[in-house]
Image: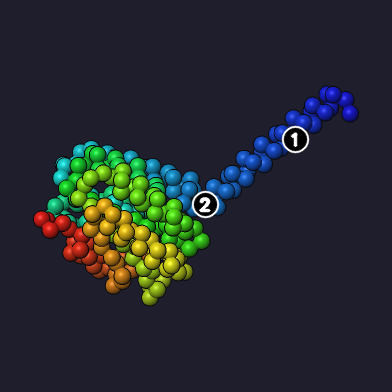
Amino acid sequence: MTMRKALITLVSATICLIAGIAVGRVWQARLRPSQSVTHRIYFDNRGYALREVAMKAPHGQVLLIGDSITEFAWLPPLCGRPTFNGGISAARVQEMIGPAVTLVRLLRPAHVFVALGTNDARNGRTTPIGDFEAAYKKLVDAIGPVSLTLVGVMPFDVAHDGHGGSLDAAAVRAENRVIQGIATQHGARFVPLAGGVETEDGIHPTPAGSRNWLAALSQGGCPPSA
């Protein structure tokens, strides 16, 4: 084999290797629903919209940070104050650190509720509990010294299952232990959600379920002075 042919062979092999790696990364991204292009676009657009609204909103509201359970809810005043809906569908705890910090900075809320963890407990793509705890602590630390309530993750509603039992029950229980422990460490309030919230599909509350969920937050999560 001449030097020229050897060089051409080496270049061709390198190109094939690079192409293979690129294709592998594309398929890897497609296999991670939480990191899909569609999710990323929606997350970024929703985050931008929340920032724009927060820039125009009055200070001293109650801020509710959450996922689709929060985003899909109509939020009445909580703890005697107007409530800002800081929910982003499909969000995991790690993803909400940046948006939460931005909203707290812009809104200067009188009280903050954090209602996250459902998407970290999805069957087949559950966040390891050590990673979940580290992300949750990072989120609470990043929010800073504000009046705070941490909300437990609702157990899967088997009676109205529309997702094929998509939550890992053991992961939900583990996450709730972590959330309660972090609340204790930070002197925050903790609202456990053992059940009693009717859902449309096992995860997302019906209108009546949403009212019950909000009542639980209001009754167990507001500071005594509210």
- Position of 144 with respect to 119 (left or right) is left
Marks 2 and 1, Cα distance to the nearest angstrom? Answer: 29 Å
167 in relation to 61, above or below: below
Extreme-left residue of the structure: 225
Is residue 218 visible to the viewer in this orientation of the structure? yes
Q: Quadrant of residue 162?
A: bottom left
- Which residue is identified by label 1? 13
Q: Secondary structure at mark 2?
A: loop
Q: Which residue type carries mark 1?
A: Ala
Color scheme of the displayed model: rainbow
Q: Position of residue 22 (x, y in %)?
A: 62, 40
Q: Position of residue 8 (x, y in %)?
A: 79, 28
Name which of mark 2 and mark 1 comes first in the sequence: 1
85 in relation to 20, above or below: below
Q: 170 or 26, which is in the foreground?
A: 170
Q: Residue at x 34, y 65 (%)?
A: 154
Is residue 211 visible to the viewer in this orientation of the structure? no
Q: Which residue type carries mark 2?
A: Arg
The quarter of the rendered structure image containing the C terminus is: bottom left
Q: Which mark is residue 54?
A: none
Q: Residue at x 20, y 50 (%)?
A: 147
Q: Neighbour class for label 1 at 10 Å: few (<14), some, many (≥20)?
A: few
Q: Position of residue 13 (x, y in %)?
A: 75, 35
- Position of 174 with respect to 25 (left or right) is left
- Which residue is identified by label 2? 32
Q: Residue at x 28, y 72 (%)?
A: 196
State how many labels appear.
2
The reply to whether the C-beta atoms of the residues labelled 2 and 1 are less than 8 Å apart is: no
The quarter of the rendered structure image containing the N terminus is: top right
Q: Secondary structure at mark 1?
A: helix
Q: Quadrant of residue 68?
A: bottom left
